Amino acid sequence: MRLPHFGLCLLATAISTCLYANENPTSTSLQENKIETKLPTIVMTATRTPKSIAEVAGTVQTIGGEEIAQQAGAGRKVADVLAQLVPSLAPSSGTTSNYGQTMRGRNVLVMIDGVSQTGSRDVARQLNSISPNMIDHIEVVSGATSIYGSGATGGIINIITKRADKSEPVAFQTKLGVTSADNFRGDSLAYQVGQTASFANDKMDGFLGLDYTSRGSQFDGNGNRISISPWQGSTMDTDTIDVNGRLNFNLTDHQSLSFGAQYYQDEQDTEYGVDYDTASKFYTPKKGLQLDNQPFTKRYAVNTQYQNTDILGQILNVEAYYRNEKSRFYPARRGASTIFSQSQSNVDYAGIRSTIQSALKVADRDLKLTYGLDYDREKDHQYVDWLGSDSSYLKFTHSNPNNYVSDYGPDTTIQNTGAFLQGDYALTDRLSVQTGVRYQYIQADNDSYYRNGLAASAATYRPSGSTDSDKFLFNLGSVYKLTDHQQLYANFSQGFSYPDIQRVLRGNSITANIDSSGIVPISVNSYELGWRTNQENGLTTNLTAFYNTSDKFVSFANSDVRVVDTDQRVYGAEANVSYPFMENYKVGGTLGYTRGQYKNAANNWHELNAFTVAPMKGTLFAEWNNDEGYGVRAQMQAIKGTDKAYQDDQALKAAGLTDNNSAAEIKGYTTMDVLAHFPVAKGRVDVGVYNVWGNQYKTVFAQQAAVTNANSLLAIPAEGRTFALSYTINY
């Protein structure tokens, strides 16, 4: 560890605390400024410490449990819900993966109860790691930040799980749901059964939830069965079990202790395989698949949280966590051969995080200091089974003569140590300033391994190695209260991500070892300027313009992943508007526009493809709700077609130049959903019709994936019209 830099950050933290130790602040000094804002009083824990939206110098959004329940018919994923409601988030892929679902053209840090689900070894299944029925609310922070360490170069999605209902000594909820394609075939049905139970008293409270979903096959707008995606996997013919629990203990008036645990399993069981043989029917799955280990995601996680609200007048939070995750993929064909490889990734992730909040007075004005230390350790292992097949390409067996299993990149251990100091000072009754610094030290070690090869004799030996990096990251923002109902905010923040070491070192043309591979943290400078309001008549608006830059980015090409030392820039704007009119009616919508380029080998700006920069996305909704529990909502989502990156890419190729940014011509599409709910027998019935028009289209992910991988098997149509019905009762 580079002790001088790390020690400097610790010293700054200690000095900042000691300077104001005699002030002996109390919790009452954590109050808001004199000018009371009328913006939502929701607290954003994704900003590391509890803050109302009105206090945050940045674009933030909270999606409540009612909205999630309304959007999430049986079988729908968190990624589908967020794509509909978050303007800066790219459209959902419709697969089991959130690969390419960026925010502001950068990667998103996904957390569950403040615990990162994103690491260096990124299998892009973070949004397929919890059932929507287990979520209390979701907090979204757009733009780069380093407040939680690595991964949040585009923003943070913090999923908060359900807790005990403290107003009820004992409470239960039961949910039953079914979804069907519009052909109403038995094999198209998805079933959901959910049960939760909670208790609460003065000393402790607890929550336990179980959700089971069984999904059938999926059908496109023309009524044809959709094929499995052989790259990122599919949600069809899967069974999902999600178990969540939490116990909270009130130890004293100032101390509390919490324990949480989750088990999640999403496993495919299908007899329909990818038709590798008939390219003209790539979108039609072929019956007869025999596969010993079908794709799955299996994970369990535990965490414990301790809080003391009076440590020398300060608030202390300490959290420890552990996660084990196994992800298996669909077999991929090696060129035109009859040999297939099926990989599995195993990740162990553990860490501890501490945060101290101090409320001080400087020149008779509030100064809030937040500081702390973080440490996490990630252990990654990925291997591949080499499989053979008969001529139909459907019956996978372990037919390799040696039943050969090889490492798919080296076993890797990554350790992160960070220290941070964040300050929030009220310069005037209307203007506050927020600034901070984080020091991050990263050490990565890899074991020796054999790189690729169908037999040990054909593999290339790679020795073990080690590399380390450190980085200071800064942020500076301000919030100005124009009136009690509206604010202006400006923010500069730095975030960083660490490349997937296993993926880099297993590349077909990579000859470097870890210490000479150019693996370093990639930092992003993020700028934003925004305006938000919440008027007394119910009008809520958030408008933001953003711009972010980096001097490196990760490139995918020809089975290689590389850290490219060149500039990248992304810019755009987003809007979120909601307006209630008359009685019980509301209309609104979102808009997200993003553009981005990087400098190619000729030092010219080149358009980024749709895996990085999503096309323009807009949504509209109109809804009616009354006090008796009746409601209906109609919503539309439109994706604008674009050929900017495609034309740019074609011009390069015509000039005989190559790049690592193959781009697709994205064809736009529009979908419409109608959602309704009404009371029945002391419970609530939800009815949904998704893709009402039954449009035949391909998602942005499917269109881009087919070009990036030069594989028409990936150009899979999206789901057609589906119907959802559920019944929920609380008792």
Image: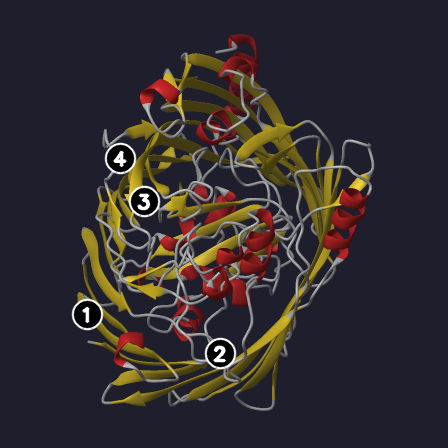
Query: Which numbered disc, 4 or 2, marks the residue closer to the eye?
Result: 4
Place residue 425 in its image quadrant.
Answer: top right
Labels 3 & 1 near each other (Cβ < 8 A): no
Residue 146: numbered disc: none
Residue designated by label 2? 221
Vertical position of residue 285 compared to residue 568: above or below: below
Give the image location of residue 2, x and y in percent: 52, 10
Q: Is residue 537 left or right of residue 458?
A: right
Vertical position of residue 439 compared to residue 283: above or below: above
Residue designated by label 1? 172
Mark positioned earlier in the residue sequence (1 or 4)? 1
- Amino acid type of disc 1? Phe
Give the image location of residue 276, x and y in percent: 42, 55
Q: Residues within 10 Å of mark 3 (few under 14, many from 20)?
A: many
Residue 400: numbered disc: 4
Residue designated by label 3? 328
Labels 3 & 2 near each other (Cβ < 8 A): no
Mark positioned earlier in the residue sequence (4 or 2)? 2
Q: Residues within 10 Å of mark 2 (few under 14, many from 20)?
A: many
Mark positioned earlier in the residue sequence (3 or 2)? 2
- Amino acid type of disc 2? Gly
Asked whether 628 or 658 is in front, the reply is 658
Mark positioned earlier in the residue sequence (3 or 1)? 1
